[in-house]
Amino acid sequence: MIKEQRQLSLLNNLETLGNISKTGYWEYDIVNNDLYWSEMTKEIHEVPKNYMPQLESAINFYLEGGSRETIEKAVEDAIESGLPFDVSVQILTYTGRAKWIRSIGHVKKEDGRVLNMYGSIQDIDESKGLEMELKSLTDRLEMAAKVANIGIFELNLKTNELLWDNQMYDVFGITKEDFTGNYEAWENSLHPKDKVRTMKELENAIAGGKDFYSNFIIIKPSGMEANIEAQAIIIKDENGIPLKVIGVNKDITAKTIIEKQLKKLYFQNQNQNKYLTNFAHSMTHNLRSSSGNLSMLIGLLKKNVKAEDKAMFLDMMELATIRLEETIAQLNETISIRFGEKTSTAKINIKDAIQKATENINALIGTKKAEVKITVPEALAVNGYQGYFESIFQNFLTNSLKYAREGIKPVINIEGKTKDDSVIIQISDNGMGIDLEKHGNSVFEMYKTFHGNKDAKGIGLFLTKEQVEAMGGTIHLESTPGEGTTFTLKFNK
Amino acid sequence: MINNLWLIDDDILFRFCIEALVKENGSVKTVNLISSASDAIGKLKDMSVTPDPKMPDLIFVDLNMPVINGWEFIETVIGLDLIDYNQTMIYILSSSLDPRDLERAKSYTQISGFVPKPITPEHFNGLIEEVKTKRESIS
């Protein structure tokens, strides 16, 4: 009796414990096909207290599909192997609610025969819900990190151990097998030109306890480069000793490329706008003054001009007409350089182009008693147009001769060389020079003349610059008034 | 009557036209055609040393000129105090369409007017009349 009483009280205690942890008990007598459910088990299944469970109906509580298959297989396996099972599955309660439970089952064997099974059922709907929520949150976070190309890292400052999430491997293009898992793994990825600066920034952040924020370039094992934006916080212990660096690395290569392109486009646009405004101003000014002169002359002719003056008026009208024609021709030429259809470029031999240009103005060189020195390698060549190069050199030569200093033999030096990926051509003279402090910004503008020379039309340098730029080159000048001028052309090789 | 008109302009055609307009108009005694601002500055400097009856009473100056442009001429004349503005009036004659030039012209009390090119005989005659009226109101 005492023993029975003790057993009863033990059972009571078990029931109480079960209630607290929402765990029910069950037992199945295989021989007599008798299934027993404890109060809590009934509560979990949301069945009435007088509910009499059967094996069949008990199994049917398990949610059709995955859950039911899982429990059936678990039971089968347990019977066969004699080992316990422990599964988390979903049931559909008596009142029709889906609920997560943990089902544990043991098998009791005697002489190799299974006599009965017993086990527990625990309501884990709440914790399972939290777990699921956490998982979906983690999944979403992972997805977001992946989409945004953000990797998360943690550097232990004590052990030098570096932890990476999956995305970090993608960002750095390193496989898990090749990852050394220490600070050096990161350091070795840094582009040489950014290495010292970036490491210093991290050191400063650790020493100063400030957050780390940096942009740097990494080189992946494949040789590809990537622009990385990094942010991290420094974790310290209660004594202020830094323990860990935790942060994110984001691949911003695509963004960086787009930003660079935008910036380039912006400057191109700005230049183009400036150029067009300048062009329109110059053109209208010249067209207006030519047509204005013509209309003035006609207006005067309509009044009573004396017969002997008429010839003079005709001469002037002819001059005005020639100027108008020249202006229109220049307009045409400029537009064809700038906007015209380009025939394909060819490798132009620079020395050859210079020699042709020199021959074209041999007479002028002779009258001016000038010396032209050409120091250009035979093979020096640039992708472009023969006509443009001849015109460019001819223009420089005539300019140098036109603006030679009084009483000094004009000497013009033309030098050509290759430097890195560029071809550099320099044309220097010992002429009058240009006051760059005064005219620096307008040297290459249309119709700008600086010396009051009667031959000056102010179109030469403007067209030269147009032609140089049309072939992808740049033009630059240095000059000291009274000493001479040096023009430097730079082209891609 | 205008005794001495100076035209400072690098454009030979415009100088020719002004000469013809002056002849046609009849109320300008002499016209001095000057092709560069530095020449004009040189002449004015000489005249400021010794008083000269050929001192211009009217100056027409172009803006767009090489070496020294019209604005630089005006700045130099003001800076070196080369002109008595009670005796001499300065007008800008320019084909510039740049509104900044017009604004700038208005900012100088020493500049009497901004005349756009080209200039018709009627315009020119009207301009000479305007100058004469202004001169009378001063004296």
Image (cartoon, coloured by chain):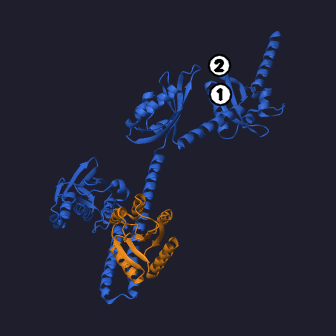
Chain colours: A blue, B orange
Query: Secondary structure beneath disc 1?
Result: strand
| Mark number, residue A86 | 1
Q: Position of residue A423 (x, y in %)?
A: 26, 52
Find residue A78 and report its image quarter.
Answer: top right
Q: Residues within 10 Å of mark 1 (few under 14, many from 20)?
A: some
> Mark 1: which amino acid?
Asp
Q: Position of residue A98 (x, y in %)?
A: 73, 38
Image position of A316 with respect to A98: above or below? below
Q: Residues within 10 Å of mark 2 (few under 14, many from 20)?
A: few
Callout 1: chain: A
Query: Secondary structure beneath disc 2?
Result: loop
Q: Position of residue A60 (x, y in %)?
A: 73, 37
> Closer to the camera, A23 or A403?
A403
Of marks 2 and 1, the one in the foreground: 1
> Closer to the camera, A250 or A420?
A420
C-beta proximity under 8 Å, tags 2 and 1: no
Q: Horizontally, is A97 left or right of B127 in the view?
A: right
Establish whether labels 2 and 1 are both on one chain: yes
Q: CA distance from mark 2 to mark 1?
A: 24 Å
Which residue position is annotated with label 2? A111
> Closer to the camera, A366 or A68?
A366
Callout 2: chain: A
| Mark number, residue A210 | none
Q: How many numbered marks does the figure carry? A: 2
Q: Residue furthest top?
A: A2
Q: Horizontally, is A23 left or right of B63 in the view?
A: right
Q: Position of residue A350 (x, y in %)?
A: 22, 58
